[in-house]
Amino acid sequence: MVLEATMICIDNSEWMRNGDYNPSRFQAQADAVNLICGAKTQSNPENTVGVLTIAGKGVRVLVTPTSDLGKILACMHGLEIGGEMNLAAGIQVAQLALKHRQNKKQQQRIIVFAGSPIKHDKKALEMIGRKLKKNSVALDIVDFGEDDDGKAEKLEALLASVNNNDTSHIVHVPPGPNALSDVLISTPIFTGDSEGGSGFAAAAAAAAAGGVSGFEFGVDPNLDPELALALRVSMEEERARQEAAAKKAAEEAAKHEKGEEQPSSSQDATMTESASVTASEADNKRNDITDEENALLQQALAMSMDDPASSHELRDTDMSDTAADDPDLTLALQLSVQDSAKDSGSQTDMSKLLADQSFVSSILASLPGVDPNDPSVKDLLASMQSQSEPQEKKDEDEPKEEK
Amino acid sequence: MNKVDLVDFVDWSGVECLNQNSSHSLPNALKQGYREDDGLNLESDADEQLLINIPFTQVVKLYSVVVKGPEEEGPKTVKLFSNKEHMGFSNVNEFPPSDTAILSPDNLKEKPVVLKYVKFQNVRSLTIFIEDNQSGSDITKVQKIALFGTTVETTDMKGLKKIEDH
């Protein structure tokens, strides 16, 4: 929520006609500018944003720093493409515009879109950078388009001379299928320095990243609650159907084997919430296991079902891990190794992997824009683990997720 | 009237310094305790100039100023502006300073610089522009800045008490 005045420098040179960014460089740039303006004004209502163009006949200020988003978006219409970019002049004019801002308490920031070759040399850019630093102006650079004549190094040198305590950033966006705005959303340019993103940025990031990040089924419940609910319900129904099929298969399997108990029902019992320990029976022992150990046990069960011989080592490590925690659990695991009449119908390789919570969280952590500690991610993990939960528990999860 | 150290009347929420090195910042030179430590300095960053703005919590009269610094990198030309806020390096030379001081090595050893008292009768904020340093090096270092003067009789709102009803 930093109070900031921002000047955005738009490159409207001839190079912007190029279509290597979808639909054209200029359009991609305009979208990115719109998003940035929205994010800035939303993160703090007193923030102001101004826009100027740095190519064409000369540097032209389209709108001076204002908090009126409509004015900013309106000035983006009818912009003409042409000429060459003049980076130095653009930055200097931006600095001047910021100097004359109405609210002197605002921090000064310039965001530059550099999509065409730079004709200045490194020294000149460094001088400009030092002047910005001296007047405590932060600079964000978006480097896109072709990289020739050492454009990237020049911009990096500029950034180095401006940067004061990581308040300035640079992003290199190579041409490709990803939209310019999507790439920018996850950068500190959008999220502000260490805020972790305003709500706007976070929601946009989640929507852009799709699928597994933060929201189930890639649909934001805030944006489209009915769709999200429909997807969730159909997923639960599918799970229930699969579970019923698995139960049936297990029952038939149990009839053929010398198994002591109904393996499917015992598995259901293990999946549900913890209960107290009773002495000798393996499934009762499993009832007192928490979600964490549940995952381990599920993995052990899966291993024992598929191939008791080859999965010994894995289970041994699992067991040694848990040995210190819970001797009862160790006993249960050992029993499960011996007990061969287990239901294996619905267990696929995928669900085995997904049951390993640590594996899933490590994957999720490596995805950009996903925070494993996010409550909706945790809910997703929990619901994925306990696939055969009864309907009531799922209903409990739903109102939680819809918050 | 007795001259007092005006550090107690500095409005810390509005104190600003342009071109300071963020790890060697203004409180090192201005605040009680930090300024006594010669190891803690205010240093300039991109070049040798510094622009410091100090607002006060009430109106003061400024009598003298002490600027302590190392022999080589200590400040030389110091311009003082009374009641001119929000200046930048580009327009600081457009206004005539209320006073200019060229610091001698003695001044850098805590000998006070006496100012043109008449120019500083009604000071709400003081801007100090350090233009260059003794040796011309790229970094200016300041160990201590102390301001001496008196307060003008202004009403202390906290001192106002309700008259008891009998």
Image (tube, rainbow, N blue to C red):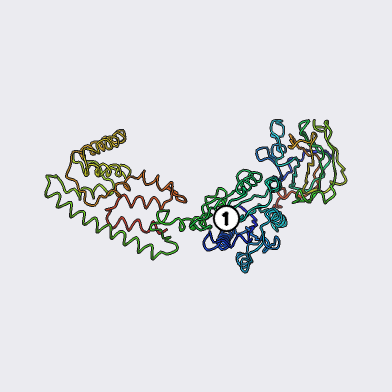
- Comparing B14 with A179, the one in front is A179
| Residue A253, x across and y down, in percent | 15, 50
- Comparing A34 with B19, the one in front is A34
How busy is the neighbourhood of tag 1: few (under 14 within 10 Å), some, or many (20 plus)? Answer: many
Q: Is residue B46 left or right of residue A402?
A: right
Q: Residue furthest front?
A: A149
Residue shown at the point (33%, 43%) measured from the top left: A292
| Residue A182, x across and y down, in percent | 50, 57
Task: State whether residue A115 is above or below residue B80.
Answer: below
Residue shown at the point (67%, 64%) measured from the top left: A62
- Comparing A143 with A313, the one in front is A143
| Residue A44, x across and y down, in percent | 59, 57
The residue pinned by badge 1 equals A145
Q: Is residue A206 left or right of residue A76?
A: left
Quadrant into which the N terminus of chain B falls: top right
Task: State whether residue A403 is above or below residue B118.
Answer: below
The reply to whether residue B15 is visible in this rendering is no
Chain for disc number 1: A
| Residue B23, x across and y down, in percent | 65, 38
The reply to whether residue A91 is visible in this rendering is yes
Q: Is residue A167 left or right of residue A181?
A: right
What amino acid type should be assigned to the residue bearing mark 1?
Answer: Gly
- Comparing B23 with B82, the one in front is B23
Residue shown at the point (71%, 43%) measured from the top left: B19
Task: State whether residue B4 is above or below residue A212.
Answer: above
**Total marks placed:** 1
